[in-house]
Image: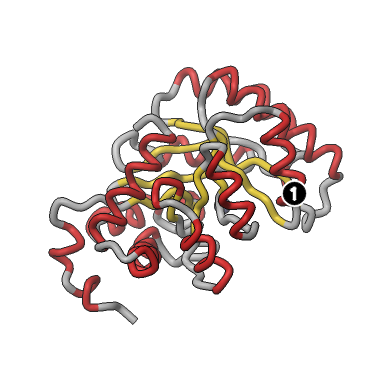
Amino acid sequence: MLSQLVKDRESVLVGNELVDAHCHLDLFAEPQVAAKDARFGGVNLIITAGGSKSSSLAAIRIADGELVFAVIGVDPEWAGSDYSFIGEISSLIKSHKKIVGIGEIGLDYKVGTDRRNQTEVFEMQIDIAKSLDVPIVIHSRGAIEDVIEMVKEKEVKKAIFHFFEGDDEQAVELSRLGYLISIPPIESSRRRRIINELGIDSIAVETDSPVVGKSPLDVIRTVEWIAEIKGISFNEASMRITQNVKKLFSL
Ligand SMILES: [Zn+2]
């Protein structure tokens, strides 16, 4: 259901900022149309993520460096087959301003890839991100303890936890290390606790569309939810969340 706030399109658009910190525009039948629709609906910053060689190259093609920026990398599922792409990441980032980070990368204990292989690929890409001083976009599934251990051990400075799977205590711990916690468009009591415990400056929103959300516009409902939990206006929530993402990606 659309709320009154969203129906009142003007109040969302005027002087506002809205971000989708993580989606996969390359998976839409018409990525440019999806981006344009999102902009028309009030979303003015989209980070589209790769996770394999082909999806990373697609993300680069789709990114325009204005509305849409790309992050590229090899996720745990592709850690075996696209291993060699890791060697191309650094030069791609150096030659494209619209690539703003490495992701999605991490650990996923629900996929078949060998865990040592995943860990090695995650670690290599963290090292590249550190050497280029760009943020990492973290994918973690069934692996949050090991991921937290890794970012601490590697002293990662800039990171966003995409589709955060941990609990509120872990979220607060990670926020103290300066990382962003990204909230997907699925409400739950666990996420409510996380939003409650986190400062607004540590929160990002994402749709992971079209995998989870239907379109980047699904951030609107999540921002409304966060605003309600935090007791602040939609405008303030959307502006501050967008600022968090801009700051992380130096935009
Ligand atoms: Zn994703």
Is residue 150 in view from this perspective?
yes
Above or below 5: residue 162: above
Coordinates of residue 245 in the picture (x, y in percent) = 40, 42
Above or below 10: residue 105: above
Q: Please tell me which residue is depicted at 56% across the width and 33% down the height of the picture.
A: 102
Q: Quadrant of the C terminus?
A: top left
- The residue type indicated by label 1 comes to Glu
Coordinates of residue 149 in the picture (x, y in percent) = 74, 40
| Residue 152 figure quarter | top right
Above or below 53: residue 9: below
Foreground of the two, 57 or 119: 119
Could you tell whether 23 is left or right of 231 in the image?
right
Q: Please tell me which residue is depicted at 65% across the width and 29% down the height of the picture.
A: 126
Determine which residue is flagged by label 1: 145
Q: Residues within 10 Å of mark 1 (few under 14, many from 20)?
A: few
Label 1: which secondary element? helix
Is residue 209 in view from this perspective?
no
